[in-house]
Every structure is written in structure tokens, then in C-alpha cells.
């Protein structure tokens, strides 16, 4: 079983159908893959999809360790025993394994957890509980650590990693679930006994201390004063690093109350969104068929109540793919932006793994147009080719920064999408560990790549045609600053098209234009940014 969170996002859509369209998608390797691909997408769900097969798996160990004196690299020694005696509490053990793998091996929760659940043969309620513990603990870990530090009287860095991860899971149960306190303490102490036996007494004492207050009371104790340090207060209250709080606040015009709502939404479990491919499926019919609901905004969106989207026959048949509704909206907006003259040649400059190329391909098929999908990483280009099979899409392995030259000639495309590699701060709700992994130092190389890609796109689009610049991040440096700077550097005549009328009629919270910033707390979508630029004569 896999949870909605494990499978949601734009990754993993590999329709295997040949489709009904007369077009054939083709996969053409035209250029050798460069040694360096530049920073990849921060959209973890997408990148995670093509990590080496075992990249998310915990390393094997010989058995439980003594729980003392391990550094980060030796964290693997403290794992609950899996061989021999069956675990008495498999759901908690699975969650421990997943959290430990994320912290020890830099694994991705949405990859490693399904593997662990499968290996441990956990289904139904056990799997759901393990998922809840894993995702909840990883999301809140920064604040849980502050509480553990306060209760333990020592910095968490000084606690053995296996004991620390077990205690994080215990603290999460105590403060964020309905598990009775005595059960949360007892099961956590059992877990510590198996992964870090030397820390049993310590863990017991710390957990008992944590039971003395509820979440709000602990927050009042560990968070900075809201008036004196509003960013610090929100950072602790909603468990996001301060630089991300500042980035959200800046994008929201300094409105700290709304920033709080945006942060809070990242801690909610997001629904799975499907895209019913135009010409192949109808969202309303599909929603009926799946027991879901049609999307609030995208005409192609279906909200799935739960379960495993991977099991749906509609996915295997290529009638739908998993895709956040915000991604559907920005791709659709590009297809609907008014242009003059021909409308036959579309370009997707950062296509892997192919979510938006799948939707653009289906829309292009209805309009007699053709999409060229460019992806720098060969393995991701293969995903694009799979995702667009049967659609009028040609996949090319190339560096998008070369657009406007050679086989992606200057002034030759009618519509161009730049779905740029970014920090992914707009989809933190789908990737629980990401907020703690991302660093402000990730920004300079990403923004420089974003600018270069957008300049290349502006060269490749013909006068009168349009470029959609999209990020799954609301960080103004990746959105407004990149767009303004790239338009200036291109030295080409550019107009900004108001993107708001390209969103569904009546959609609220679209701001003053001409760009659009979607938000989970406003729209229920990932925080996608969209700018539409028209190249003038
Ligand atoms: C945000 S993801 C695109 C997601 C995709 N549009 C979708 O909807 O599935 C960015 C992609 O750009 C690719 N990329 C990074 N640098 C690139 C470059 N210089 N040229 C082309 N693609 C690049 C990454 O490998 C990644 O697949």
C-alpha cells in the first residue's frame, strides 16, 4: 500500500497505453548528456522518482547497537531487529526505520516508507498509522527537537541518533496524536530498548517530562515571543526554518497572519490530485468512477479521497496522471494565452518527469499542435517519453539553455513552458523532510539557472508567441526577481501578459497581476508561480 502523500505530486505517471490519438510520441536522444546538469528540480517527488533503486533504503546492520557514542554515519547500527522474532509493534518500528533512514541516509520518506511497509507486509490501519507517524514526525522535527531539548536539559545533537529518532516519534505521538500517553511512552521505551539500549532510562525520563504539557503549552515555553520575534515565533509554532517563514511572508506582502495560515497548511495531509487527460477522460465521470470529487478549479482535476493512486486502472491505461491541480492550471494557462498567427509548435524546456508535458501533449493533440519536450537528464527524459506515449510529443535530451540555437532554433516556437528547477518551497506539504534539508545557499545556483533557461526560452519563442515561466516555489527571488532580471538580460522586446484571466473564472486570491501566485491555503494547490511573457515584434 502507498499513501496519497507517498504518490502525490507530478511524479510517477507512466501511462503505458498507446493512446487513441493518431500521433506517436518519440524519444530521440539528440545530444550527449552533459556531465553536469546544473541544479536539478527541487520538486522532490519528481527527483525522488529517479534515484537509484535502493537509494531510499535503510542500510543493513547486524542488529541492535548499544546506543552509545555513534556519530551520524553510524546511525544505522541502531535499528530495530527485523530478523528472527517478529516485531511486537510493527507500525512504530516501520516509522522508526523510515525516520532513521531519512536522517541517516538522506533518504526520501515518500520512497523509503513504501519499501519498508512492503518489506514488513504492513497494510491498512498499520500502514496508515506508520505513515502518519513518519510524515508527522518529519514535518515537525525542528520543533519536536526544541521540546526534547527543553525536557532533556540537553541539546538533541548530544543524543545518540537512534535514541533521538525514537524519542522524536514518541514526542510526536504524545503531542500530536490521540495515542494515550502511557502507550506512547511505553512503546517508545520499547523501541529505544531495541535500537539504543543504553538510552532506555534517559528516554523514559524525557518522555515522561514531555507528558507534563500539551503541544500549545510546550510551544508557549519554547517559542520566541510573537511581538518581539514574529518570524521566530511562527518558525517554532508551525515548524518551518526561519528563512522559509521570511520567504513566505515576503511573498505574502508581509501579512504575518496569512503567513501563519500558509505555514499551517504545509503541516496538513494533502489530497491526491489526478489530471484527467483531455480527450481521454472526463473529470466528472472519472470522479464518479473513482469515488472522488471533481477539482475546484482545473477542468481536468479529480481529488482522490485516499487509497493508492498507483493501483488505478485509469493510470495504467494512460487516461489520467497524478498531478497537483496547480500544475494543471499553469500548463492550461499557457495553452490558452492569446497569441497571433500559427499555433502548431510548442516547447517544454524542463520536461522531466513529464507531468506538464503529458497535459500539454493531450491539449496539443486536440488542437493539431506538437510539443517538443526537452530534459537535460537522460533518465528523466525516459520518464517524459513514457508519460507522453501516444501523444504528439517529441522528447529530446538537451540542455534547455541552448534553446534559441541549433536544433531548437531561435524564434521558432509558438508557446514555450519553462517549468524551472527550483527550491520546491511550494510543495513542502507533499515532502515532509524537505523544509529541513533545503538551505538558503541553494538559491544562488538555482536562480542563475532559472534566469539562463528563461532567457533561452525568450530567444526560442517567435515574435507574437508566449513563454510561461513556472516555479513550484513562492520565493520572490525565484519568481518576480528571476522573471524581471531574465526579461532585462534577454534584451528582447517583451510584454508581460496578465495571467489572471487565464485562470478559471471566479478563482479568488489571484492578487494584482500580471503574475499569479497560487497557495495551498488559498487554493488547495501547491504554491505554483506563473508569469506569461509575450515576445513582441
Ligand atoms: C521542476 S522540474 C520539471 C517538472 C516537469 N515540468 C513536470 O511537470 O513533470 C525541472 C526539470 O528540469 C530539469 N533540468 C534541470 N536543468 C535543466 C537544463 N539546463 N535543461 C533542461 N532541463 C533541465 C530537471 O532535471 C527537472 O527534470
Image (spheres, grey):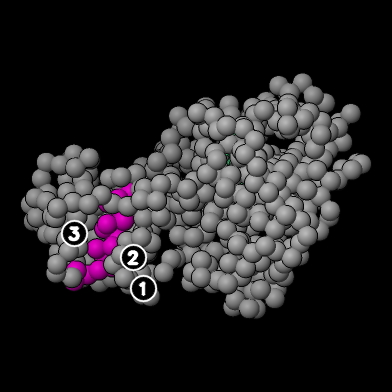
- Per the picture, the main secondary structure of the magenta-coloured stretch is helix
Q: Quarter of the image containing the C terminus?
A: top right
Q: Relative to 454, say whether 130 is above or below.
A: below
The residue at which mark 2 appears reads as 117
Q: Relative to 287, say whether 41 is above or below.
A: above
The residue at which mark 3 appears reads as 80
Q: Is residue 214 magenta?
A: no
Residue closest to the eye, 4 or 312: 312
Residue at image position (19%, 42%) is 74
Residue at image position (78%, 48%) is 370
Residue at image position (52%, 49%) is 46
Q: Quadrant of residue 299?
A: bottom right
Going from the N terminus, do you reach mark 1 or mark 3 first? 3
Give the x, y percent position of residue 141. 33, 50
Residue closest to the eye, 394 or 451: 394
The reply to whether dot 2 and dot 1 touch (C-beta < 8 Å) is yes
The reply to whether dot 1 and dot 3 touch (C-beta < 8 Å) is no
- Alpha-carbon distance for marks 1 and 3? 19 Å
- Alpha-carbon distance for marks 2 and 1? 7 Å
The residue at which mark 1 appears reads as 123
Q: Kindly state the secondary structure of the residue where label 3 is placed.
A: loop
Q: Which residues are magenta?
A: 87-102
Give the x, y percent position of residue 237. 40, 50
Q: Is residue 97 magenta?
A: yes
The reply to whether dot 2 and dot 3 touch (C-beta < 8 Å) is no
Q: Could you tell whether 133 is left or right of 181 in the image?
A: right
Amino acid at each position: 500500500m502507498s499513501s496519497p502523500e507517498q504518490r502525490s505530486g507530478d511524479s510517477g505517471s507512466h501511462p503505458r497505453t498507446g493512446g487513441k490519438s493518431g500521433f506517436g510520441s518519440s524519444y530521440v536522444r539528440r545530444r550527449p548528456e552533459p556531465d553536469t546538469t546544473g541544479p536539478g528540480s527541487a520538486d522532490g517527488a519528481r527527483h525522488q522518482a529517479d534515484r537509484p533503486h535502493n537509494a531510499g533504503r535503510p542500510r543493513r546492520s547486524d542488529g541492535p547497537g548499544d546506543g552509545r557514542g555513534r556519530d551520524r554515519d553510524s546511525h544505522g547500527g541502531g535499528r530495530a531487529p527485523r530478523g528472527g522474532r517478529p516485531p511486537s509493534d510493527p507500525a512504530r518500528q516501520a516509522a522508526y526505520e523510515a525516520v532513521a533512514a531519512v536522517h541517516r541516509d538522506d533518504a526520501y520518506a515518500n520512497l523509503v516508507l513504501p519499501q519498508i511497509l512492503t518489506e514488513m507486509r504492513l497494510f491498512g490501519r498499520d500502514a496508515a498509522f506508520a505513515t502518519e507517524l513518519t510524515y508527522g514526525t518529519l514535518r515537525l522535527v525542528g520543533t519536536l527537537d526544541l521540546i526534547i531539548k527543553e525536557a532533556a536539559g540537553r541539546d538533541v545533537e548530544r543524543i545518540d541518533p537512534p535514541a533521538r529518532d525514537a524519542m522524536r516519534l514518541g514526542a510526536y505521538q504524545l503531542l500530536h496524536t490521540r495515542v494515550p500517553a502511557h502507550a506512547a511512552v511505553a512503546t517508545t521505551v520499547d523501541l529505544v530498548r531495541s535500537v539504543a539500549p543504553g538510552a532506555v532510562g534517559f528516554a523514559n525520563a524525557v518522555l515522561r517530562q514531555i507528558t507534563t504539557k500539551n503541544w500549545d503549552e510546550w510551544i508557549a515555553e519554547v517559542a520566541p515571543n510573537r511581538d518581539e520575534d514574529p518570524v521566530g515565533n511562527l518558525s517554532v509554532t508551525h515548524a518551518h526554518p526561519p528563512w522559509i517563514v521570511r520567504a513566505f511572508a515576503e511573498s505574502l506582502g508581509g501579512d504575518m497572519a496569512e503567513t501563519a495560515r500558509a505555514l499551517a497548511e504545509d503541516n496538513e495531509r494533502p489530497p491526491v490530485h489526478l489530471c484527467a487527460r483531455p480527450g481521454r477522460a472526463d473529470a466528472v465521470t472519472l470522479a464518479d468512477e473513482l469515488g472522488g470529487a471533481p477539482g475546484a478549479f482545473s477542468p481536468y482535476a479529480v481529488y482522490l479521497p485516499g487509497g493508492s493512486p498507483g493501483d488505478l486502472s485509469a493510470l495504467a491505461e494512460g487516461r489520467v496522471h497524478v498531478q497537483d491541480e496547480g500544475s494543471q492550471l499553469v500548463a492550461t494557462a499557457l495553452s490558452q494565452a492569446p497569441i497571433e498567427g500559427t499555433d502548431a509548435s510548442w516547447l517544454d524546456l524542463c520536461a522531466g518527469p513529464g507531468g506538464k508535458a503529458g497535459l500539454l501533449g493531450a491539449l496539443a493533440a486536440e488542437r493539431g499542435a506538437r510539443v517538443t519536450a526537452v530534459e537535460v537528464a537522460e533518465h528523466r527524459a525516459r520518464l517524459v517519453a513514457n508519460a507522453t506515449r501516444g501523444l504528439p510529443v517529441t522528447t529530446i535530451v538537451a540542455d534547455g539553455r541552448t534553446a534559441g540555437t541549433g536544433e531548437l532554433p531561435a524564434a521558432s516556437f509558438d508557446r514555450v513552458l519553462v517549468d524551472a528547477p527550483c527550491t520546491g518551497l511550494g510543495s513542502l506539504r507533499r515532502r515532509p523532510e524537505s523544509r529541513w534539508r533545503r538551505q538558503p545557499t541553494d538559491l544562488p545556483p538555482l536562480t542563475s539557472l532559472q534566469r539562463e533557461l528563461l532567457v533561452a526560452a525568450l530567444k526560442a519563442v517567435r515574435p507574437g508567441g508566449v513563454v510561461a515561466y513556472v516555479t513550484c516555489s513562492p520565493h520572490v527571488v525565484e519568481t518576480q526577481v528571476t522573471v524581471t532580471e531574465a526579461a532585462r538580460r534577454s534584451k528582447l522586446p517583451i510584454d508581460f501578459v496578465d495571467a489572471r484571466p487565464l485562470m478559471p473564472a471566479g478563482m479568488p486570491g489571484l492578487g494584482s497581476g500580471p503574475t499569479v501566485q497560487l497557495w495551498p491555503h488559498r487554493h488547495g494547490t501547491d504554491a505554483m508561480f506563473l508569469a506569461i511573457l509575450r515576445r513582441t515584434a
